[in-house]
Image (cartoon, grey):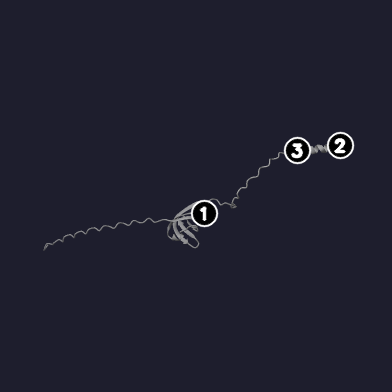
Amino acid sequence: MKKVLVFLLAIALIVTFAGLSMAQEKKPAEPAKKAEPAKPAEPAKKPAKAKIHQITGDVTAVDVKAKTIKIKGKDKEVTLDAAGIKDMAKIKVGDKVVAKYSEADGKMTAKSVKVKKEPAKKAEPAKKAEPAKPAAPAKKKAPGY
């Protein structure tokens, strides 16, 4: 009789565990997704968008080989990496310029450098020559006085 009870108990446990395993909801199989085109790999770290600064001042140094320009503004002096400036050869020491640049990782990179044209000084019109005044007639001295 013990064998029968053990057998019935074993069957009850099997049915219980089988019922629990069937009670879990099975998700329906999802249809296969279409293959998406491969995306280009993104850089690991995107640098923050650099803010554009502007300086107006005099060119104090130009190094064509190193592609740098030093500009002295009203309150500061900056050295810009001018690798992207096409007409750098036209910029000379002493020129007044307006430069737009960005600063990232401690490096200032010129976006544009424009030479300010000095306003042409208006030549003063030549003064008109004043007509010569006739000489005053010589006074005759009276004899003996």
Identify the residue position indicated by label 1 in the image. Answer: 103
Query: Where does the image place residue 23, in percent across and percent down from the top left?
Result: 73, 37
Q: Please state which amino acid type lies under the numbered disc 2.
A: Val
Q: Tally the numbered discs.
A: 3
Query: Where does the image place residue 133, in percent across and percent down from the top left?
Result: 20, 59
Mark identifier at residue 126: none
Comes first in the chain, label 2 or label 3: 2
Judging depth in this view, the residue of 129 and 67 nearest the camera is: 67
Judging depth in this view, the residue of 82 and 38 nearest the camera is: 38
Residue ID at (87%, 38%): 3
Query: Where does the image place residue 43, in percent across and percent down from the top left?
Result: 59, 53
- Give the CA distance from mark 2 to mark 1: 87 Å
- The secondary structure type at the circle numbered 3 is helix
Q: Please state which amino acid type lies under the numbered disc 3.
A: Leu
Does the residue at mark 2 contact the one at mark 3 (Cβ under 8 Å)?
A: no
Left/right placement of residue 69 relative to residue 139 reads: right
Q: Is residue 39 above or below residue 83?
A: above
Mark identifier at residue 4: 2
Identify the residue position indicated by label 3 in the image. Answer: 20
Comes first in the chain, label 3 or label 1: 3
Residue ID at (75%, 38%): 20
Q: Nearer the viewer, mark 2 or mark 1?
A: 2
Comes first in the chain, label 2 or label 1: 2
